[in-house]
Amino acid sequence: MVEQLIEGFVAAFTLWNLLFITLGVAIGILFGVMPGVGGITALTLLIPVTFYMEPITAIAFLIGITKGSTSGGAIPAILLNAPGSSENVATARDGYPLAQKGKPEKAMRMALYSSVTGDFASDVVLILLAAPFAAIALKFGPAEITAVGLLAFTLIAGLSSDTLAKGLLAAAFGVFLSTVGLDRAEGTQRMTFGVIDLYDGISLNALAIGLLALSSVFSQLFDSWRTPADQLIKPKPYNKADQNLTWAEFRACIPTLFRSAYIGTFVGMLPGLGVTLAAFLGYGAAKRASKEPEEFGKGKLEGIAATEAANSAVTGANLIPTIALGIPGNIAAALLIGAFLIHGVTPGPFMMQQHGALIYGIFASMLMANAVHLIVGRAGIPIWVLSLRVPKPIILSCVVVLCVVGVYVPSSSFFEIGLMFAFALLGFFMRKTGYSLVCLFIGFLLGPLLEHSLRQTIILYDNAFVLFTRPFALPFTLLTLFFIWRFGIYHPARRRKERAAEADLNSRDIKK
Amino acid sequence: MKADSVTKSTFASGVVLAAFGAAAIFWIIPTYVTGANSDRGGLTPGFMPRVAAWCMVVIGCVVAMNAFRVILGKIPAIAEESEENEILAFGRNEVTDSIIIMLLSAAYVFGLIKLGFLVPSAIIIGAVMYCTGYRKIIPLVAISIGFPALLEFLLWNVLNVPLPEFPLINF
């Protein structure tokens, strides 16, 4: 393997390759910065451009875009609390408060270093495991995928919502929305109401941009409209001395970085679970492991490190099922499969045998892209910080238009723009009433996978109790039940007890 | 007061979502899912929508009942925090804001269809900037017109991607 990797480096280390990796990372960051536009749009727009390139340069360029867009999405999350894409939602939780404390550069540096670390760790795992993983993944049947999906819903609902029931309700609504469109098994219409734009289902792009980006913009716009200028919480002034990320601060985050990198890598290996899930699992794990969990959400560096390392770690690991089985782990991997096919390479178990030199060249390019990502990303940070000087009304109003462009460009559909505004309104309601946007989004994203695996499970085994009898599914099912008890029964009961004790104490004080 | 408004809105949303789930089970799915009523061991195209709808009914009732018990004072409320550090409250202001979003969205989409990208985008940017307290008129006008024009120019000339056009103007 080492020999093949060295040969891969020899093939990949060319001026053209380096140039296109750099260009890819820069474009990825640029598209990632625009809320709602993101790396997927960049990939979609630029895959045709790669038609004229050498296969190794083409794939390296596209991988550069994917890597850049993940860390690029963290920039608006940190500076504006408007995540570039769903995987950066958790970054905003600590990144934005830290920027409000006058330390935006520190937050962005932490995000970049974490992103590169997570990327690097998952690339190493990809190189080591691409072939052996094929054997393990083949043992994951529909029952196991169903069990993992149910565990994912419970965990996300428990972690991102204050009450499990509200989180699960949002997730169920998301799953329901995901069933709109043509039935994948039979091709029959489901709740399309005769609207042709709904035949392919509700647009993921419109839902993500409306629910996550535009609703945040509306919420911020109304807050600044209603709050008198003198009562607005103004960010602390930018102080150059506060911006450095010290070695001690970075070292304190190293365990979090590696934990999140492993979580992201594991999630990335399993097709369909996606980047957002990895980001939230990484964040949740860091919060649980921390000695100061109450500091999370208030500008804690570990929160940024956990999210960015986890979401970036998915990028490399997602290529494991793509290369080993030809199954894309997410939309970006699916687009990469398209690019592979354009260049005459069919992803799947035979890919390593037939195009070994190309695959190891791509692995080498991925490692090179991490170094380029660090340099390009680091150079860009002061430029992005300048954007903080631009008044918020200008940025937010321009983001509204960018969101419209982000939805219209891939679809050329006014219906999808209307849909995006409808989801923005739904997101606004949910933000104000304490429902988890992420749960709805994850429900929508994982809905088709869950439906497919659940239907297969019932067809194959006649019932769903197989989740308790299959050895690979049982641990996931038991964990799901454990988390339902913990987040749904134990936690609320304990919190209500604490609240009652507090109220009791207060009433005694008043009597005295 | 604000916690009350959140509890009441939680109760209302629980009822609404449970009712929506029930409507889906008894009306939307049987009517608008082709083949949902055929008898194939339940694994029809309506299978997953029904599973999701039943979940909404059950969990919606749980959410509504818990909120109702809090309103009646039988159990103390759990202090909820927003996912993104925002203030949780749903009162008259939020209803007004929602109506504004609806009107703004409808006007913008109508404008895009009838006038193309440039004009309604310029109006939206200008209006939003003005309403949120930006009062420097020259930059306001320059950004309102310049930003959408730049976007349209870049997308059309660099990426060859068309945006909705004004019926009489072809860039």
Image (cartoon, helix red, strand yellow):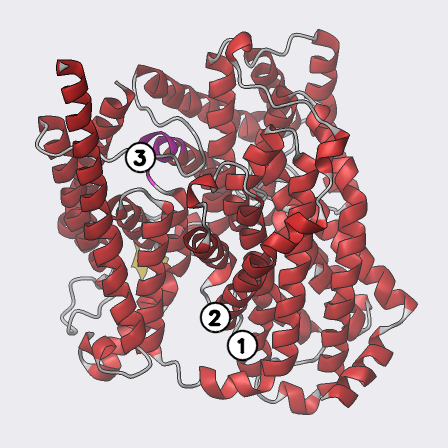
- Which sits in the foreground, A450 or B170? A450
Labelled disc at residue A180: none
Mark 1 in CB contact with mark 2 (< 8 angstroms)? yes
Q: Is residue A157 left or right of residue A394?
A: left
Instruction: Provide the chain ID for the residue under circle 3.
Output: B
Is the stretch drawn in magenta largely helix, strand or loop?
Answer: helix
Residue for badge 3: B80
Q: Which numbered disc, 1 or 3, marks the residue closer to the eye?
A: 3
Q: Are marks 1 and 2 on the same chain?
A: yes
The residue where tag 1 is placed is: A321
Amino acid residing under circle 3: Glu
Q: From the image, which quarter does the C terminus of chain B lie in? A: top right
Q: Residues within 10 Å of mark 3 (few under 14, many from 20)?
A: some
Q: Is residue A181 left or right of residue A331?
A: left
Image coords of residue A208 (percent x, y): 48, 45
Q: Secondary structure at mark 1?
A: helix
Instruction: Return the mark for residue A271.
Output: 2
Report the front residue among A423 and B68.
B68
Above or below: residue A463 compared with residue A207: below
Q: Quadrant of residue A30?
A: top right
| Residue span colored magenta | A428-435
- Kind of residue at disc 2: Pro
CA gap between label 3 and label 2 equals: 33 Å
